[in-house]
DNA sequence: TCAATACATAAGCACAGACTTATGCGTCGT
DNA sequence: ACGACGCATAAGTCTGTGCTTATGTATTGA
């Protein structure tokens, strides 16, 4: 998978939701599906996309597969964004704005 | 446009290319089309998407419309990424990796 | 005033991608 | 050994979206 496709991978809200849940703790595919109106194959396909993008990794444990975030997969996104850091006002970096975002 | 759709907007390579060219200097729609195998309406539609996402702004000048990057539009992306900063190794932030990325 | 230019909008098409159901493969418990 | 379970893969459907051509609107220069 090309680095350039990181945006396509993250464009899907379900996949971003998966990352967010995995940020808290390692989880199986079935656990990730809890509370979501999504079929098992759909989740499996999303997880495959995330894995191929290097955003998550898996650890087999018998019948179960535990997924976890692979933070280095976000490096291309970080580096893309870095090109624009020089342009934006300091305010964007401020803690206030970050907290406001996390609040919503 | 919802903040959540910033990824969809940036998922398109043409739109990322537009941002990259605009990062250098203000430019008209026709200038942005130079070197790209893309029709005028297609470019106009991409610019509309970028504008609605708050990623660019326009300054009319007679028949011409000069576009420029609106860096604050990237704030949602920055803030999304900030949630994962805590997880990743210091190495991702390092200058070496950024340079390697810019090199390719 | 009128043709040319710069850009936007409308409408239709075609492909990508997210979903579904059906099925396959390996592992567990009994 | 065998049914239940966890997950992956296959194949088909449908919606979203990026493209096209055609046309509209405003501005410019001759």
Image (tube, coloured by chain):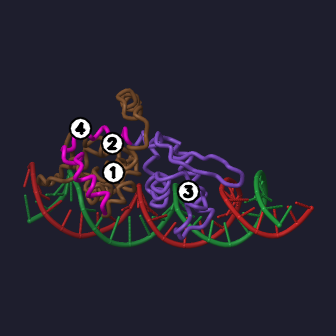
Chain colours: A brown, B purple, C red, D green
- Our reading of the magenta stretch's main secondary structure is helix
- Is residue A100 among the parts visible in the rendering? yes
Chain containing the residue with disc 1: A
**Image coordinates for residue A24, horizontal then vertical, percent:** 23, 38
Q: Which mark is residue B81?
A: 2
Identify which residue is drawn at 47% across, 42% down.
B73
Neighbours of disc 1 within 10 Å: few (<14), some (14-19), many (20+): some
Q: Which residues are magenta?
A: B78-104
> Pointer 1: what residue?
A77
Return the residue nearer the eye: A23 or D10: A23
- Please give the label number shown on residue B46: 3
Residue A81 lies, in percent from the top left, at 37, 48
Residue B86's label in the rendered image is 4
Contact check, label 1 and label 2, Cβ < 8 Å: yes
The verdict on a common chain for dots 2 and 4 is yes
Left or right of B42? Residue A57 is: left
Report, in whole angstroms, how far the alpha carbon at label 1 lies from the one at label 3.
21 Å
Residue A48's place in the image compared with A69, above or below, is below
Residue B56 in picture, x, y percent from top left = 53, 47
Disc 3 and disc 4 on one polypeptide chain: yes
Q: Earlier in the sequence, mark 2 or mark 4?
A: 2
Mark 2, secondary structure of its residue: helix
Disc 1 and disc 3 in contact, CB within 8 angstroms = no
Q: Earlier in the sequence, mark 3 or mark 4?
A: 3
Q: Is residue B10 left or right of residue B45?
A: left
Q: Around disc 2, counting alpha carbons within 10 Å, would you say few (fewer than 14), some (14 to 19), or many (20 or more)?
A: some
Q: Residue furthest top?
A: A96
Q: Is residue B48 magenta?
A: no
Local crowd at mark 3 within 10 Å, few (<14), some, or many (≥20)?
some
Q: Tag 3 or tag 2, which sits nearer the N-term? A: 3
- Tell which subunit mark 4 falls on: B
Disc marking residue B52: none
């Amino acid at each position: 998978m090309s680095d350039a496709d990181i945006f396509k991978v993250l464009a899907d809200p379900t996949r971003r939701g998966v990352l967010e849940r995995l940020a808290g703790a390692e989880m199986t595919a079935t656990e990730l599906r809890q509370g979501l109106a999504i079929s098992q194959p759909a989740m499996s396909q999303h997880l495959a996309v995330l894995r191929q993008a290097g955003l998550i990794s898996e650890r087999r444990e018998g019948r179960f597969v535990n997924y976890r975030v692979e933070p280095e997969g976000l490096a291309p996104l970080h580096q893309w964004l870095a090109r624009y850091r020089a342009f934006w006002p300091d305010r964007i970096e401020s803690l206030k704005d970050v907290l406001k975002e996390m609040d919503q």
